[in-house]
Amino acid sequence: MAACAKTLSIEEPTLTEEWTVVLSRGRKHRRYFLKTETPKQQQPQPWVPVDVEINPKRELKLMQRMQNSIKRVESSQFYHSFLDQIQMLDGFPRVLGSELMMQVVIYGIGNIEGSESSRLQLSLAILMKRRFSWIGNMEVFDPVLSATECRVLEALGCTVLMVNEHGRRQALKPTLFFMPHCEAELYNNLLQANRDAKLLNNVVLFGNSFRAYEQIVVDFKPPNIVNSSQHIMAVQRFTNEFKIYKSLKDNFEAFNEQSWHFFNPEDDTVLYRIDK
């Protein structure tokens, strides 16, 4: 590579590792290399709920709580502002292109039986599907889900994944990743799996603000965030982020600091990680 490539410096890196741009003299592909040790990637693993109890009364109670959460979100000022923002963002039609449907993958929804925030977040995703005809099948995964929660999710029209993908789903077609309040590592895994421009252009991500991660890294450099957010930092130059509207009337902490993320890398851009 050194004999046939020209290496250019780019803006000051926000991480302790160095990012460089490599332009091939032949096809002039623009690649961003992170010079760091590459950890062993987690492989997809078959998964079954730890709690396999089937209890109709428990299911009914959870379904009633979900219906209440859906009604609460649907009647909120926050939800109507949320819909207005979606309709104004041009990133959705750009990602859809000629496709009619955008599949939805929900990672890290948490324990919907025990967490009000999880129920509110799931309610928002379900309401989106009911509202927009271009929202397709919704796949859900969180390793903490119980059998009861899986049955309720299926009853609500979702598909529960029986494989732990560790967030490494490749977006082979337009895909909305709905990931509110997930850990940085999960976003990082997703971006690593979709580091090719053709894949990244198929991704819409709803989740924690990448700008907030960048600011934390720049200001404080906490090792846990630095080590788990390399791809979040690298993709910033290709990211259009739109913070969701918050209503003063509705106090939904479940949606604090959440943003829409759209990616527009050049066609010849590929993000790689290489060992030292």
Image (cartoon, helix red, strand yellow):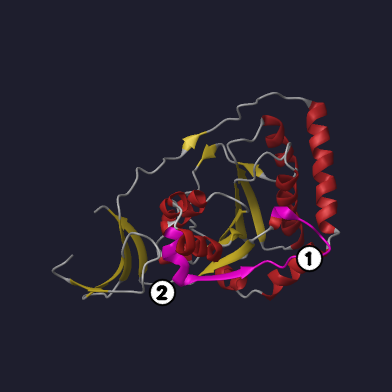
Tell me which amino acid carries mark 2: Glu
Closest to the camera, between mark 2 and mark 1, is 1
Decide which of 248, 83 is in the foreground and name it: 248
The picture places residue 56, in percent across and down from the top left corner, at 80, 27
Quadrant of the image for the N terminus? bottom left
Circle 2 — which element?
loop
Decide which of 36, 148 is in the foreground and name it: 36
Q: Give the side of residue 158 with respect to residue 18, left or right.
A: right
Quadrant of the image for the C terminus? bottom left
Instruction: Say whether disc 2 or disc 1 marks the residue closer to the N-terminus.
Output: 1
The residue that appears at 55% across and 63% down in the rendered structure is 212
**Which mark is on residue 266?**
2
**Which mark is on residue 247?**
1
Task: State how far apart marks 2 and 1 are (Cα).
Answer: 36 Å
**Which mark is on residue 115?**
none
Circle 1 — which element?
loop
Can residue 144 be seen here? The reply is yes
The picture places residue 138, in percent across and down from the top left corner, at 64, 50
In magenta stretch: residue 245? yes
The residue that appears at 65% across and 56% down in the rendered structure is 136
| Magenta-colored span | 231-254
In magenta stretch: residue 267? no
Question: Is 265 above or below relative to 186?
Answer: below
Q: Residue furthest left?
A: 3
The picture places residue 215, in percent across and down from the top left corner, at 51, 65
Tell me which amino acid carries mark 1: Ser
Question: Is 85 above or below relative to 254?
Answer: below
The picture places residue 238, in percent across and down from the top left corner, at 46, 71
Dot 1 alpha-carbon crowd within 10 angstroms: few under 14, some 14 to 19, many 20 or more: some
Can residue 198 be seen here? The reply is no
